[in-house]
Structure formats: structure tokens, C-alpha cells
Amino acid sequence: MIRMTVLVLLSFATISWADDTRPGSDFQPAVLVQFAVADLDRSIEFYRDVLGLEFELRIDELQWARFKTAIDGLTLGLGVQDEVTGSGTTSLNLGVANVPTARARLEEAGVEFLGPTQTIPGVVQLADFLDPDGNKIRLAGHPDSTGP
């Protein structure tokens, strides 16, 4: 199993949670990233067994499941939809201690990557792959990391 920290790079926003006078101050600092999937069982197996995320909840009546992440307030939801087209340009970035090691473990589990690992010297290494429904996932880590 690969230990990962989930990093979601959807957009950048500055929010002051201490400002209770603003409209909508009842919102909690929580984020759910949700992917559309075709087969809930297959997707639960992939995210739990292949990626090692912690399975939290399944609601069969809604055809929906949720996973915990290592970040408080951030969860991943999977919901069955009739038309699944993948995540397009949005990707779920998984921070890992060592990209080559994590990539090798995922390749051993049958994950096919979209190309070679990209390295921005001194900044980051990135390796992209798709989940079974075409949602883009990226391993991200410091290029100088020697791993655990």
C-alpha cells in the first residue's frame, strides 16, 4: 500500500473562516471532491486497494461512496452516473514521498501511466494516470526526495 497525502488543485481562493459577519458564515471549512464513476464496486476497490485511501462510507440507495484523506476536512466522493467522461483537465493530485517508488508500486498493481514522469528540476516530479473511469490522477513529489 502506498501512503499518500491528497492535494487538490482545483482553484486558489482566500477564505477567512474567522469572519462570521459575512453572508454564508454557517459554512464549515470542508471540501468534498467528487468523481463520476460507472461501477461503484470497481471504483471502491481501486481507490481503497490500489491507491490506499481510507474507505469511509457507502450509500447504496444513492450509488455513492466516500473516502477519508490525510487532510482534515477534505474527502473524496464517488457517485455513479449514466454518462462518465472522466475529469477532463481537472486532476486529483496525490502527494507522495517518492514518485518513482510510488509509480513502480502502482505499475505493479496494473496502473498504466499516461507518459513518462515529468520533472521540474528542484520543484516537483509529476506522473499522470487515469482511474477506471478516466478521472485524471497525478502523483506529485519533490524531485530530490529519497523516499521513506
Image: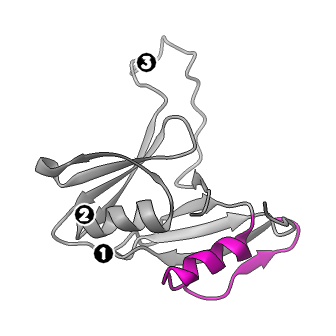
Could you say which is closer to the camera, residue 136 or residue 49? 49
Q: Is residue 90 above or below residue 23?
A: below
Foreground mark, 2 or 3?
Answer: 2
x, y percentage for residue 137?
A: 51, 69
Q: In the rendered view, does 59 fall on the left or right side of 131?
A: left
Q: Which residue is mark 2?
A: 40
Q: Which quarter of the figure has residue 57?
A: top left
Q: Secondary structure at mark 2?
A: helix
Looking at this rendering, what residue extends furthest in the top direction? 21
Kind of residue at badge 3: Ser
* Quadrant containing the N terminus in the rendered view: bottom right
Q: Which residues are magenta?
A: 98-123
Could you say which is closer to the camera, residue 89 or residue 92? 92
Q: Which residue is mark 3?
A: 25
Q: Is residue 31 above or below residue 91?
A: above
Q: Which residue is mark 1?
A: 85
Pointer 3 local density, CA inside 10 Å: few below 14, some 14–19, many at least 20 = few
Look at the image and say whether residue 148 sits in the magenta stretch.
Answer: no
